[in-house]
Image (cartoon, rainbow, N blue to C red):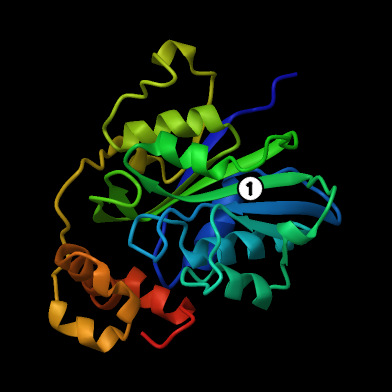
Amino acid sequence: MTKPCCVAVVRASATTIIQDYARLLDHVGIPPTINGSTQLQISIDRRYPFPGSSAPPWQTDGVARALAAAQYLHQTYQLSRPDSDDWHGHVRVAHSLHIGSAALVENERPDLLVLLGSLRRRANEWLSVAGLSQDWPEQVVAIFDATTIGNGPAGIASHPQLGNFLVASNNLFVLHWIANRLLGVESREHGSIQRLPTYELIGDTELFDQRWMPIEYGFPATLSRWANARQPEYGRWSKRDQELYTSWLYDTEWGRLFRSYHRRDV
């Protein structure tokens, strides 16, 4: 029997993000378990955090809490690239929730694998970065955080756009196609719509009717605040990236939420 395929989308806000992730996973319908295990594979695409590029820390927080409530009590995490200084905040979240590092667990196959990443243009790059494991378990859920969307390739030329929603699926193929559709591009890798399996849209489905086309960033640039950020390592960024990061950090609800997760006083 073919496993039912669904795509869930929910609106999100910085004040309700933990509940928003719980609602998202409830819509996707993660398999019930008692004392089951999960592994979170977290996509990090830049050395330093940048809006709409890598998985944000509240994604790990919200997903881990929702899985614990569903009785997935043995959780591990794995980052797609090293982050020894925890600039992205996931390690701090994992420690606070008693989630162990997958690198320290040998020969353990989780009951459920959860792929975490941000929604950005060229969604196929996210799937290749997140696919760290060659031996996936049968149960896989993939989640895009679209609270801030990155328009542009990973690591360069990204134009962040506030999206304020989350999208997930238990089918990577379908989620890839939906992500491209949301971003207004065709999925060249997987071909035509006729090849898609049957799927169901769940949640705040009116969001699927929108198209998040690439645009210039829409929040005000306040470079004068850069001196207050106290991040000397970012000094090698271009002026444009400095403006984008700083204005996102101080002038959007998601940037302010990121500051509450961050390891340093920014």
Structural crowding at the residue carrying mark 1, measured as other residues with C-alpha within 10 Å and reported as few (<14), some (14–19) or many (≥20): many
Residue at image coords 44%, 85%: 264
The percent coordinates of residue 254 (x first, y second) are 35, 69
> Of the residues shown, which amino acid type is indicated by label 1?
Val
Residue 25 at x, y = what percent?
60, 50
What residue is disc 1 on? 114
**Nearer to us in this view, 49 or 141:** 49
| Residue 24 placement, left or right of 137 | left
Q: Quadrant of the C terminus?
A: bottom left
Outermost residue, top direction?
194
Q: Say which quadrant the N terminus sits in.
A: top right
Question: Would residue 73 be visible to someone looking at this image?
Answer: no
Residue that appears at 52% across and 74% down: 85
Q: Using the image, determine if residue 154 lies above or below residue 102.
A: above
Classify residue 138 as left or right of residue 119: right
Q: Is residue 142 above or below residue 40?
A: above
Q: Quadrant of residue 66?
A: bottom right
Quarter where residue 3 is shown: top right
**Total numbered labels placed on residues in the image:** 1
Question: Is residue 80 shown above or below 205?
Answer: below
Q: Position of residue 186 (x, y in %)?
A: 31, 24
* Residue placed most toward the observer, 177 or 48: 48
Q: Residue furthest front?
A: 236
Look at the image and tell me whether residue 214 can be seen: yes
* Front position in the image: 240 or 141: 240
Q: Secondary structure at mark 1?
A: strand
Answer with left or right where residue 56 lies relative to residue 30: left
Corner quadrant of residue 243: bottom left
- Rendered location of residue 39, percent (x, y): 70, 52
